[in-house]
Amino acid sequence: MTTGFGTDTKINKWSVDLGYKVNSNLSFYAGYEDTRFEDFVTPGGENFVGTPEYRWTTFGIGYGLSDAAKLTIQYQISDVTNDFWVSNGGTFRGGLLTTQLSIKF
């Protein structure tokens, strides 16, 4: 087996996204996502101790530069627990700041 997914693995995921449009050019948004894997197994086939859990919280702002261009700035916070592949069951947290320029043509 090369993945941690077995025949009994269950994925429980839920998310919520909120947005507020101040005017036609300015909007704010926030989101949260929680994903858990139950009955996860190691590549050798034995049951993995712990439940891998991934949580992301996102905040952002979008600004319309013109009718065809929009700039988005977003900050995402991650909180990962019991990740087998990256940290062999450990926990890690971090953040990521991104920008995106969208142009319609």
Image (cartoon, grey):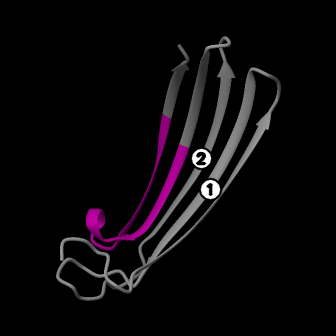
Residue drawn at x 25%, y 71% as measured from the top left: 3
Q: Is residue 83 above or below residue 46?
A: above
Magenta residues (range): 76-97
Label 2 is placed on what type of residue? Thr
Q: Is residue 82 above or below residue 23?
A: below
Q: Secondary structure at mark 1?
A: strand
Which circle marks residue 32 in the picture? 1
Tag 2 near tag 1, CB within 8 Å: yes
Depth check: 65 or 91 in front? 65
Label 1 is placed on what type of residue? Tyr
**Displayed quadrant of residue 46:** bottom left
Residue drawn at x 30%, y 71% as measured from the top left: 84
Main SS of residues in magenta: strand
Name the side, left or right, on which 3 lies relative to 7: left
What is the C-alpha distance between the residues marked 2 and 1? Answer: 6 Å
Depth check: 27 or 75 in front? 27
**Displayed quadrant of residue 73:** top right
Instruction: Decide whether residue 15 is among the magenta residues.
Output: no
Q: Which residue is mark 2?
A: 58
Q: Is residue 31 above or below residue 85?
A: above
Residue drawn at x 27%, y 66% as measured from the top left: 85
Instruction: Decide whether residue 92 is among the magenta residues.
Output: yes
Q: Secondary structure at mark 2?
A: strand
Q: Position of residue 98 (x, y in %)?
A: 49, 33
Q: Position of residue 15 (x, y in %)?
A: 62, 60
Q: Residue furthest right?
A: 23
